[in-house]
Image (cartoon, rainbow, N blue to C red):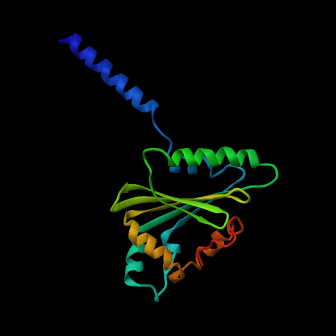
Amino acid sequence: MTKMIKTFSMLLFASLLLAACNKQPTIQEYYVQKQETDNFIAIDLPASLLKVSDDASEETKETMATIKKLNILAFKINETNEAEYKSEYTKVKEILKGKKYNELMRMKHENMNVIINYQGDDDAINEFVLFAADNDRGFALARVLGDKMQPEKIMKMANDLKNIDSEGASDAMAQISDLFGDVNIN
């Protein structure tokens, strides 16, 4: 009996060790690791700073209520950090290719490539990740954290961004607004 318990214990330990070695990094871990690093700008915004205007539809108001927090991490390219940019860009792409993230959509806007991924169930998402990159200006990584967000409602709300009053967030967003000139919250 003790031999069987020892064998089972060894198998359990080996399984746990193997599972720990295969741990893929997350965007949250990347964000925490890079937020105090040179060449990165990090901004954490509670959803309370992004108020919905009175003109917004009820659906937009309900959708905004599911968003709890917004984390933004941006890397701006300059003459001295192009090699680091390529390395960091590759790291982010590899994290997003991991099993933890599901791709929602890809698009191109002028010179910027945008990828939107999510974590959670298809109809109850807890995290959206927006990755926008321009090889001349840099990249921005935004984590939209919430509770049971629905992709179709988030995308519909994104089209209705004119009804989001970002007065409280505009000071923080000014720090990265020149990274992707025509992309802003206003």
x, y percentage for residue 41? 67, 58
Residue at the image point whose x is 37% and y is 79% from the top: 59
Q: Residue at x 35, y 59 (%)?
A: 122
Q: Quadrant of the N terminus?
A: top left
- Residue 72: x %, y % from top left: 58, 61
Depicted 125 relative to depicted 54: above or below: above
For the view shown, which residue lies furthest in the left direction?
1
Quadrant, the C terminus: bottom right
Identified at 48% across, 39% down, the residue is: 24
Q: Name the quadrant containing residue 111.
A: bottom right
| Label total for image | 0
Q: Nearer the viewer, residue 19 or 172?
A: 19
Counting from the top left corner in percent of width and height, residue 9 is at 29, 20
Answer left or right for 52 relative to 43.
left
Residue 18 x %, y %: 41, 27
Q: In the image, is 68 to the left or to the right of 80?
A: left
What residue is drawn where x is 43% and y is 68%? 67
Res 84 quadrant in image: top right
Q: Residue furthest right?
A: 79
